Image (cartoon, rainbow, N blue to C red):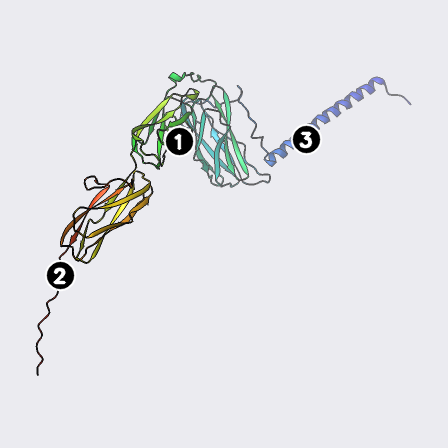
Amino acid sequence: MKRPHLSALKSWSVGHLSLAILGGILSVWLMGAMAYSLVANLGLTPDSSARSVPTTSQSVGLVPERDEPSPSAPLAPSAPVQPAAAGPSFTVECAQPKAISPQAGDAFNCQVSSKDSFSQPVAISCANVPSGLNCEPEPSIVTPPANGTGKFKLALTNYDVAPGRYQFKVVGSVPGASGVFNFPFDTSTLAPVPTRSPAASGRVNIQCATGSTRLIPGQSITYKCSYSSEGFYGSVPTSCTGTIGITCDISPRSVTPRDGQPAEAILSLNVAPNLSSAGANQVIGVYGDPSGGTPRSIHKFTVDVPAPDYALNCADKTATAAPGETASLKCRVSSASGYVGPLHLKLLTIDANGPTAAVAPAAVQVGAGGSAEVTVSFEAEPSVSPGSYRYALGVHADETASFTAATGDAPHNVTLTVAVTSPEPSPTPSPTTSPET
């Protein structure tokens, strides 16, 4: 038996080896194609948390300056929502952005597109927004019609984004699923915001809803304070200072006003309940503090805290009684300007020989803004002559204070009058006639 020639054997081995290598390559290619088809059919999307910054070969969406996207700037699709099982889904799409200069804003057309008859409300939000950029979807909930699109605007304001290339997320969410559009935001070609020293960093004006006010001990009151910006961009720490017996607080502790968009804070003032008198024209200060390089802004207003007081009032100051009768009047003692404590009542007879008078109770306790009723009674003895009789009723915080008609002036004193009428004559008996016989 002849042995094959060595050169022929070598030629046969090389040919079969080439075929084996080619077959392996085709097998790998077929397996990759099947895996790609499986991923596409399952609707698997890339990890939405991955952050991709556009390179020079990727479009950052700079288009001519116009409010609406042009045909050359079509809506860019997001990764579609697709549950593990096939079913309705949606995508979020936005027009490619154009550059936004510092301290400027623009709005971009966006839409939620329904797939396979999807028609649920989709909550729109922004995520991973770079510092200094404000992102507001308008509206924030979009419901696309089945197999149609729901429109919304994305309002972007570049307050102080540092130059660079960024990418944030426009997220559409429904329970259990979400769609993400990666929105490129490029400020690399824009001139940076000039660094400002505190002396040239704009201005913040503060105005509270009062120029002066009158407070009483024990009172608490709140005011709105507005922080408005004139060319200043950033946060402003807030603070306030009180005065004798008045404490203040302000919330929040930091506000961020924008040009044309003032920020509000609530100022609270509390007056000590035992404050006897703080006097007039005291100053309350509201500040934008200079900490962190913010401009110092001051708003001051005055407060007047009067001394606690009380008052005496009688709805009716005249009583009428006949000899041998008793009459009464009702009066009320009231706290004024936050007075808290006991009050003592004294009754002085001005005209002698009148009815006997008394006040009860002779002492009352009132709280801030409270009052108490007292009764003044007059007993006209049968011997009292008809006429008009005057009495002085006074109220005092000091039980030992002297009280005379000369010193008891309103609002701590009131003059009461009792009119004693003449007794009615006894009826004259009619004459009797003798009975007929």
Q: CA distance from mark 3 to mark 1?
A: 70 Å
Dot 3 alpha-carbon crowd within 10 angstroms: few under 14, some 14 to 19, many 20 or more: few
Please report contact status of discs 1 and 2: CB closer than 8 Å, yes or no. Answer: no
Mark 3 vs mark 1: in front: 1
Residue sticking out furthest to the right: 1
The numbered mark, 1 or 2, whose residue comes first in the sequence reads 1
**Residue nearest the viewer, comparing 126 with 233:** 233
Q: Disc 1 marks which amino acid? A: Asp
- List x then y, in percent, for residue 306: 29, 34
CB-based contact (under 8 Å), mark 2 and mark 3: no
Amino acid, disc 3: Met
From the top left corner, tell me how far across and down residue 338 is, in percent.
32, 38
In-image side of 51 versus 375 (left or right): right
Residue occupying image coordinates x 39% and y 18%: 201
| Label tally | 3
Cα–Cα span, label 1 and label 2 = 71 Å
Q: Residues within 10 Å of mark 1 (few under 14, many from 20)?
A: some
Q: Position of residue 32 (x, y in %)?
A: 66, 29
* Quadrant of the image containing the N terminus: top right
The numbered disc on residue 31 is: 3
Q: Which residue is mark 1?
A: 249
Element at label 1: strand
Please report the residue visible at 50 percent of the width from the left and 21 percent of the height from the top: 165
